[in-house]
Image (tube, grey):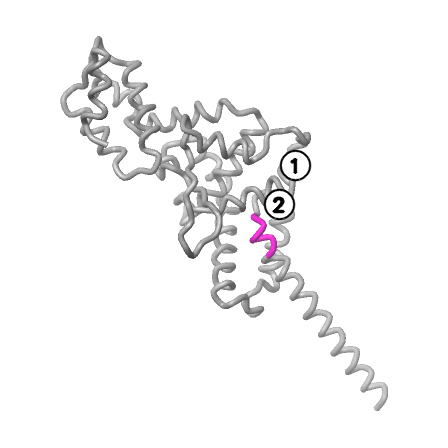
Amino acid sequence: MNCGAIERPAQLAGDEFEPGLVDVLLEEVKNRPGALPLLEYTLQELWNRRKGPRLTHAALREIGHVRGALQQHADKMYSTFTDAEQEICKHIFLRLVQSVGASRYTSRRAPVEEFLAVTVSGMRLRKRLGLSDNSPDVQRVLNALTGESSRLIIITRPSQSEAGDFVEIAHEALIESWSKLREWLDADQEFQRWLRRLRDVIAAWQTANRDEAALLRGILLDEGLKRSAERPTDVSAEETAYMAVSYKQRQQEEEREAQRKAAFEAEQRAA
């Protein structure tokens, strides 16, 4: 995108930019996925606040630059959802952000199927919210968030070594600039830290060719089972499957120990 692509439509409408304003805008959206809808929204807000025919630096400061425009855009999109859709929206964004320290977060790319398995196939989110069969599902919310008028999240195509599409937040700045998302994250820090540790453990298990030595045991498995039972819609199908394998391994070990003990006691009685 170049200066002319922004300036020409304004010139045709009889408007103009203050010197240097277009350069500032281009720098703020440079190398950002979903930059075009974000820039379009920012330009619309600048046009709404123009002084006569001129779009100004003062107006850009008033809306908080592109980041401020991003927050307004996210709030506007969120307000179009029903209560049920807002809950699904919250669930999606919490799955696309991970904790990297105290009140520090970064975006996370996740398979589309991760959301569909949790909320559509499993129907767990609907059950928790008391939704009827014709209620909006996660696919509809995903479509809205990835649509041309929103682009808050984006769908990316996999590499040759990956299967299925992936979803991620379109603008990393959204994590810092959207106050609603920050509120969700800050209220959810402990669970998010646990979830990140679980993902790291699963990655190590997969790297070890699913070696049973890399499964959860003891209090770590107890914690995982407790958290997944308390918040089933916030744990993916892959994460649930890993804990199920871990639990099955525990049962098998307990059965073998019971058999060993029974055999030992039988030998003692026979002696």
Quarter of image, res 75:
top left
Residue type highlighted by circle 2: Pro
> Which of 233/176 is in front?
233
> Which of 148/87 is in front?
148
Residue 45 % position (x, y): 31, 19
- Tell me if mark 2 has few (under 14), some (14-19) or many (20+) residues whose alpha carbon lies within 10 angstroms of its own: some
Label of residue 104 in the image: none
Quarter holding the N terminus is top left
Q: Main secondary structure of the magenta part?
A: helix
Q: SS for tag 1?
A: helix
Q: Spot the residue most to the front.
A: 160
Q: Spot the residue most to the left.
A: 19
Tell me: residue 14, above or below residue 219.
above
Image marks 2 and 1: residues in contact by CB distance under 8 Å: yes
Q: Is residue 89 magenta?
A: no
Q: Residue at x 54, y 42 (%)?
A: 115
Q: CA distance from mark 2 to mark 1?
A: 9 Å
Q: Residue at x 45, y 54 (%)?
A: 162
Q: Is residue 239 magenta?
A: yes
Q: Which residue is the site of mark 2?
A: 232
Q: SS for tag 2?
A: helix
Residue type highlighted by circle 1: Arg
* For residue 267, side relative to residue 113 (left or right): right
Q: Which residue is the site of mark 1?
A: 128
* For residue 239, side relative to residue 146 (left or right): right
Q: Spot the residue most to the bottom.
A: 271
Quarter holding the C terminus is bottom right
The residues colored magenta run 236-241
Q: Residue at x 47, y 57 (%)?
A: 200
Residue 6 % position (x, y): 23, 24
Whichever of labels 2 and 1 marks the residue nearer the N terminus, that label is 1
